Amino acid sequence: MINKNENPEFLNSFLDYSITMLNKSPNSIKEYNYDLTMFLKFMKMHFNLTKETDINNISIKDFGIDTLKQITLDDIHSFIYYLAINNNNKPATRARKISSIRIFFNYLVTKLKIINVNPAQNLETPKREKRMPKYLTLEESEKLLSITANEDSKYKERDFAIITLFLNCGMRLSELVGINIKDISFSDSKLTVIGKGNKERTIYLNSACINAINSYISVRPKDGIKHDSKNSHKALFLSERKERISNRTVQYIVDKELKRAGLDTTKFSTHKLRHTAATLMYKYGQVDIRALQELLGHASISTTEIYTHVDNDQVRNAVNRNPLSNFHY
């Protein structure tokens, strides 16, 4: 939880604007708050406005607008240097903090209008290493499904439906947890989920998903379900306590089934199952990248492109299929 009492008013104003007008998710707001409080704490050290040497113990409640106006691009670069050298932040982490700083200063200049010059206007993003997403192979995916289907547990149908939806639909963890029964249209074989930025999108369900959901609903508890702030009585997936299943419980289920399948839980997780679904659809289903973008709920096509990587077999096949491959001297 964010303790807004520890923030200066202009930071709280930015957070409120981000969630109400920019429609940012609670997780994004937490990230903004974390990034920007660290940034302001560093600036108090940088400008010698505190005798505290531990950045975590610095208070920013009294951070003034006059100090904000003093910040230049060079000062921001000093903060990025601090992140890289003192905190050992990787380029991806630094890029996120840079993005937070950019949006923050743009708000201060164009919306709140408490400073006239945007010091982050020409702030560049560090180059990021392109890493191939980790994913399960087709054989590993089939093994995971088989292991889960044959689990000796009263929650077998629920756990199998969860794994099936992850591997077939590529949905996010928060999207799966948020599914209500009324969100499923069995006649049209589709599901409505709420993705990032509270954006609603449609996910079409194949027969494996429909069968898994139906099997689970047939054994889903009908009595004693809690009527609480999480709307547990509407939720598709319920916990042992008969309330909407939590992110942590789903992560535990996935971790447990991965271990039972003999798969490395340090490499794979719920998000890696999303990677797996996207990769399998692209590799075996020949899904158009635009369709994949729509399915995964990506705002930018560049995000989807990480799933269109090719493996060594594809590269080898491409060379072998060259019409000149059989021309021998």
Image (tube, grey):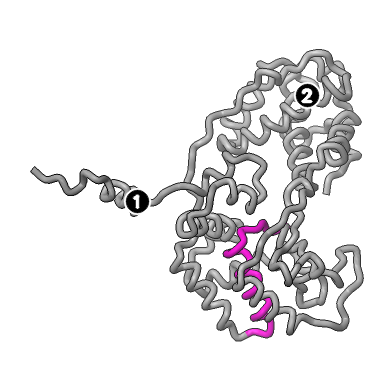
Image location (x, y in percent) of residue 202: 71, 57
Relative vertical location of residue 242 with respect to residue 204 in this rendering, above or below:
below
Image location (x, y in percent) of residue 308: 49, 47
Q: Which residue carries the number 2 mark?
A: 106
Earlier sequence position, callout 1 versus callout 2 = 2
Q: Residue furthest left?
A: 329
> Residues under labels 1 and 2: Cα distance?
44 Å
Q: 194 or 16: which is nearer to us?
A: 194
Residue found at x 70% / y 19%: 121
Residue found at x 88% / y 74%: 226
**Mark 1 near mark 2, Cβ–Cβ under 8 Å?**
no
Q: Is residue 173 magenta?
A: yes
Left or right of residue 152, residue 59 in this image: right
Closer to the observer: label 1 or label 2? Answer: 1
Q: Which quarter shows the C terminus?
A: top left
Residue found at x 60% / y 86%: 152
Which span of residues is magenta-colored? Answer: 153-174
Q: Is residue 196 magenta?
A: no
Q: Secondary structure at mark 2?
A: helix
Residue found at x 62% / y 64%: 166
Q: Which residue carries the number 1 mark?
A: 312
Q: 169 or 16: which is nearer to us?
A: 169
Amino acid, disc 2:
Asn
Image location (x, y in percent) of residue 165: 63, 66
Amino acid, disc 1:
Asn
